[in-house]
């Protein structure tokens, strides 16, 4: 398959997904913190050492001034009730509404601008231009969480942020609620009369995601068959499909994760040459997703699964 650059936000999201996810947390003597097992019960306490994929990070005291340069981390921090400790977030952290959005960038960071907030913890999902090392040299702890590869990675990252911010119980509660909600979505779906196929669109150039990616694995939880899986011989995870491949596959569902960035919707899909005959178009199974929800790996993945599950539930059972 051919491959072209995505729009800016999509580029960073998919490249992050190729990185390693957070592992477990350990602690100095007399302190218990999270492990890679997402259901682990942990105790709050400082100092605490978080074992991330990029190495250990020690946080001496409960952070009071947190800067988040990751939209997903911002959502996680507010979900675990650490929002009052967050003093600044990056330009793409648009959720929740009360997040203190600034013009800080996690992609082209300005170390002086970040340091001006006097943070005692910075959370990032990319490390461009040696950002983590620069901040660490100033005595600022940095937690680097790459994009999750699996839902368990998401749980681990939430638990790690809980340990790092003094919100262990709240983080455990969020993880438990997510697990229950996801189980409920999966268990509520009737068995379809046949395997249901889908196409997930990241942008209007027909870039998609395979089952090996985080988003692809979410679809797999619902038993859907990904038409992009046979179009990624290099294992990149995000192949650019051709219109011919999509038309030949004739998916049962089309999920659009480019409604906000690229103005795509059911009408624009139906207007593409030849697409008006696709099963998904004919049956009204072109599902418009919220780009931000579909591109992040935090607590709102439950919303995404509920949206997809709701669409699938409308198909007659076996």
Image (cartoon, rainbow, N blue to C red):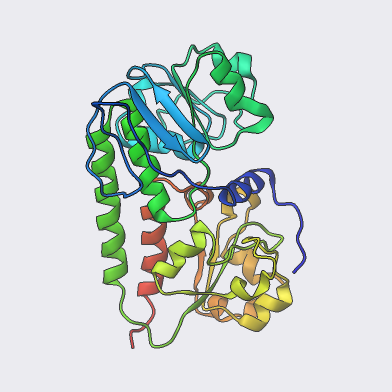
Q: Residue at x 62, y 26 (%)?
A: 131
Residue 18, above or below 248: above
| Image-based side of 194 in relation to 32, left or right | right
Q: Is residue 304 visible?
A: yes
Tally of marks = 0
Residue 10, above or below 203: above
Q: Is residue 107 visible?
A: no
Which quarter of the figure has residue 28? top left
Q: Residue at x 27, y 70 (%)?
A: 187
Quadrant where the N terminus sits is bottom right
Quadrant where the C terminus sits is bottom left
Q: Residue at x 49, y 73 (%)?
A: 285
Query: Percent from the top left, x then y, of residue 80?
Result: 31, 35
Residue 263, above or below 170: below
Query: Percent from the top left, x then y, of residue 259?
Result: 58, 54
| Image-based side of 239 in relation to 182, left or right | right
Residue 318, above or below 144: below
Which quarter of the figure has residue 75? top left
Which residue is nearer to you in this view: 42 or 166?
42
Which quarter of the figure has residue 98? top left
Query: Percent from the top left, x then y, of residue 63?
Result: 37, 19
């Amino acid at each position: 398959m051919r491959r072209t650059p995505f729009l800016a936000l999509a580029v960073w999201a998919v490249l992050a997904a190729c990185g390693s996810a957070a592992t477990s947390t350990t602690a100095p003597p007399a302190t218990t913190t999270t492990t890679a097992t997402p259901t682990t019960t942990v105790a709050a306490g400082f100092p605490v050492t978080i074992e991330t994929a990029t190495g250990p990070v020690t946080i001496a005291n409960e952070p009071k001034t947190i800067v988040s340069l990751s939209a997903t981390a911002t959502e996680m921090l507010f979900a675990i009730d650490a929002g009052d400790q967050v003093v600044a977030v990056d330009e793409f952290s648009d959720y929740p509404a009360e997040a203190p959005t600034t013009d800080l960038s996690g992609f082209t960071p300005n170390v002086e601008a970040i340091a001006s907030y006097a943070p005692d913890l910075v959370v990032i999902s990319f490390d461009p231009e040696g950002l983590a090392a620069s901040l660490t040299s100033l005595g600022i702890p940095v937690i680097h969480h790459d994009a999750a590869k699996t839902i368990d990675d998401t749980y681990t990252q939430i638990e790690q942020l809980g340990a790092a911010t003094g919100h262990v119980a709240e983080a455990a509660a969020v993880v438990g609620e997510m697990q229950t909600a996801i189980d409920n979505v999966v268990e509520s779906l009737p068995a379809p009369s046949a395997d249901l196929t889908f196409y997930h669109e990241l942008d209007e150039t027909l870039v998609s995601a395979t089952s090996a990616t985080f988003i692809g694995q979410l679809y797999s939880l619902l038993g859907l068959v990904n038409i992009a899986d046979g179009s990624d011989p290099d294992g990149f995870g995000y192949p650019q499909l051709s219109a011919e491949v999509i038309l030949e596959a004739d998916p049962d569902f089309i999920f659009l994760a480019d409604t906000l960035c690229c103005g795509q919707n059911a009408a624009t899909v139906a207007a593409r040459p030849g697409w008006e005959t696709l099963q998904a178009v004919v049956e009204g199974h072109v599902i418009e997703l919220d780009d931000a929800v579909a591109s992040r790996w935090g607590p709102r993945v439950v919303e995404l699964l509920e949206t997809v599950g709701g669409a699938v539930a409308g198909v007659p059972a076996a």
